[in-house]
Amino acid sequence: MTSSPFKEGAGVAAAFFLALWPQAQWFVERTFDGSDEPLGLLALATAAILAWQGKDLLVRKKTRGRRPLNTPPDVPLSQQLAWLALVLTVASSFFLPNLITAALGLCAVALVAGLFRNPGLMGLLFLSLPVMASLDFYLGWPVRLAVSVCAEELLNLLQLPVTREGTLLFFQGAEVGVDPPCSGLRMLWFTAYLSCTLAAMNRLSGRKLLLLLPLAALLSIVANILRAVALFFPESGLLSFPHWTHEAIGAVLHLTVALGLLALVNKLTQPCKTILHSSYSGPVSA
C-alpha cells in the first residue's frame, strides 16, 4: 500500500514546521521587536511571489511509469541534502547563534522546495534574515570611517583643504560628520535585494549571480561615497541648497545604482539570448 503524494507532502511540511519552529519564532520576534528594520519581510514576500510565478520551473518533473516491486524509492540528492540541513539545524540550535541556525534552516527549505534551481530566490531568502541591527552594530562605524576617508581624499582632489578626525570632516571651522544613516549599509542591502530580484526574474545562474553581487556592491559603495561628498557642500556651508536636497541626492544615486544594475543584468543575459537567436539559421535553400 503506497501513500499519496499529498500525504507525503503534508508529512514533510509537518516535519519541517516542527523542526524549524524555534527559528521561525526567533525570526518573528527579531523582526517585530523594534531592534531591527523589517526589511527582511520585503525580501521574503518578493521571494514568495517570484517562486509562485515560476513554480512550474522549480518542481522536478517525475518520470512516468510504475516503479518495479521491491525497488527502493529514488530520492533526489537535493532532498537528501535538505534532510541533512534540517538535522544540522536542529542539532546546532543548542550551541550556535539563532542567525546561523536560521540560515541553515533556510537552506533546508530551499533544497526541499526546489528553490535552489533559481539562485536569485535563495539570495532573497538569505536577505530575509533580520540582520540590519547586527550589521549596524558590527560594521556601522568601520564603514562610516571608510566613507569619511574616501570623501576626504576626493574633496582634497577638488582643492578643498578638508581634514578628518575619525568620521568627522573639518573645513574652515565647519564640522561635518558621517552619521550612521550615511554609512551606506541600507543602500548596500537594497542593492543586494534588487540584484537578487533581477537575477531571479531573469533566472541567472549561480555563477552569474556571484559575478553580479560584487559589481553591485561596488556600485553601491561608490554611490554612497559620492553622496557623502555631495552632501558635504551644503552641510559645510560652501553651497546653499533647499532643505530637500539631502533626500533628493540620495534618491538620484539610488536610481543611478538601479539603472546600473539593470545594465549589468542585461549584459549578463545577452550571451544566452545570442545563443538562442543563433540556434536557428533559417530555411536551407536548395
Image (cartoon, rainbow, N blue to C red):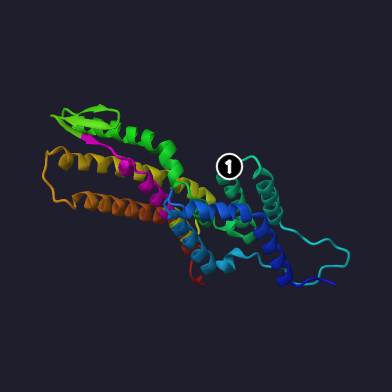
Where are the magenta residues, as a range? 176-194
Residue 44 visible, this orientation: yes
Q: Main secondary structure of the magenta part?
A: helix
Residue 258 locus on image (x, y percent) = 34, 54
* Residue drawn at 63 percent across, 55 percent down: 20
* Furthest residue toward right: 70
Reply yes or no: does residue 109 show up in magenta.
no
In the rendered view, tell whether residue 240 sits above or below residue 118. above
Query: Observer-nearest residue: 253 or 30?
Result: 30
Answer with left or right where residue 178 lies relative to residue 48.
left
- Residue 265 drawn at (x, y percent): 41, 54
Visible in this render: residue 159? no
Q: How many marks can you see? A: 1
Q: Which residue is mark 1?
A: 97
The three-letter code of the residue at mark 1 reads: Pro
Foreground of the two, 106 or 275: 106
- At mark 1, the secondary structure is loop
Task: Assign the N terminus to one quadrant of the image.
Answer: bottom right
Question: Residue at image x 80%, y 71%?
Answer: 66
Write the residue at 19% across / 53% down.
244
